[in-house]
Image: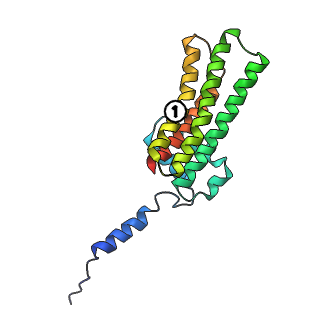
């Protein structure tokens, strides 16, 4: 007895592939963990635990269905963080705390984060419009605030009081950039 089975058609194979491929993220219902695992593998500077903790801190991330939704959430987190850092720097300057020599550095950092506060909403607008290249440019400009701020202190051979904040902001913008590059 000879049993023969028909070979699946090419269109059937393509449909199955597309269905399976659509489950890259969120197969286990945890898009944040899946994304952070993938992103930290792609970018060794991106810390998995930081990624999960920061994205999970926003309750909207629990309902995110795809990278587009997660991208907006990550950019909102960046905006909140930049606002917080900007306020923190302004308060240090207002209170006159810290070394007098650090004042020009802090003023530069305040300006840098003010620029980031302009760049992030632009990045979000471009991201929503699916102009990922322009979004990437704007988020990269925001990311530069953290790096340049640290460099300003190094230039004057001073210890930055913003190292932790700058490092966290760098990580947050790296998350947004990674999402933008993955969509």
Task: Choose between 147 and 94: the one closer to the eye.
Answer: 94
Q: Quadrant of residue 149?
A: top right
Q: Is residue 33 left or right of residue 114?
A: left
Asked if 179 appears above or below 110 in the picture, the reply is below
Residue furthest out toward the left: 2
Callout count: 1
Position in image of residue 98 (x %, y %) = 72, 14
Asked if 50 appears above or below 15 in the picture, the reply is above
Query: If the image is split into quadrants, where does the N terminus sit?
Result: bottom left
Q: Residue at x 55, y 49 (%)?
A: 71
Colouring of the image: rainbow
* Residue 142 in view: yes
Asked if 25 appears above or below 146 in the picture, the reply is below
Position in image of residue 79 (x %, y %) = 63, 39
Q: Residue at x 50, y 35 (%)?
A: 140
Q: Is residue 88 left or right of residue 16?
A: right
Residue furthest out toward the right: 95
Residue furthest out toward the bottom: 1
Q: Residues within 10 Å of mark 1 (few under 14, many from 20)?
A: some
Q: Which residue in the protein does label 1 denote?
A: 141
Q: Secondary structure at mark 1?
A: helix
Q: Quadrant of residue 166?
A: top right
Q: Residue at x 54, y 60 (%)?
A: 28
Q: Residue at x 66, y 19 (%)?
A: 106
* Residue 46 in view: no
Position in image of residue 148 (x %, y %) = 54, 23
């Amino acid at each position: 007895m000879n049993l023969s089975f028909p070979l699946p058609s090419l269109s059937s194979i393509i449909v199955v592939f597309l269905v399976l491929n659509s489950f890259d993220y969120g197969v286990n219902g945890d898009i944040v963990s899946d994304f952070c695992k993938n992103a930290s593998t792609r970018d060794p500077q991106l810390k998995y635990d930081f990624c999960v903790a920061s994205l999970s801190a926003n309750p909207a991330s629990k309902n995110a269905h795809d990278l587009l939704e997660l991208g907006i959430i990550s950019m909102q987190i960046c905006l909140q963080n930049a606002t917080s850092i900007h306020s923190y720097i302004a308060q240090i300057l207002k209170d006159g705390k810290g070394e007098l020599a650090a004042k020009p550095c802090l003023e530069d950092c305040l300006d840098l984060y003010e620029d980031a506060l302009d760049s992030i909403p632009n990045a979000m607008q471009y991201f929503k419009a699916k102009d990922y290249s322009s979004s990437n440019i704007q988020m990269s400009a925001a990311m530069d605030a953290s790096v340049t701020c640290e460099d300003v202190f190094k230039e004057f051979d001073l210890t930055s009081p913003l190292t932790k904040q700058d490092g966290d902001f760098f990580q947050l913008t790296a998350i947004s950039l990674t999402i933008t590059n993955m969509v």
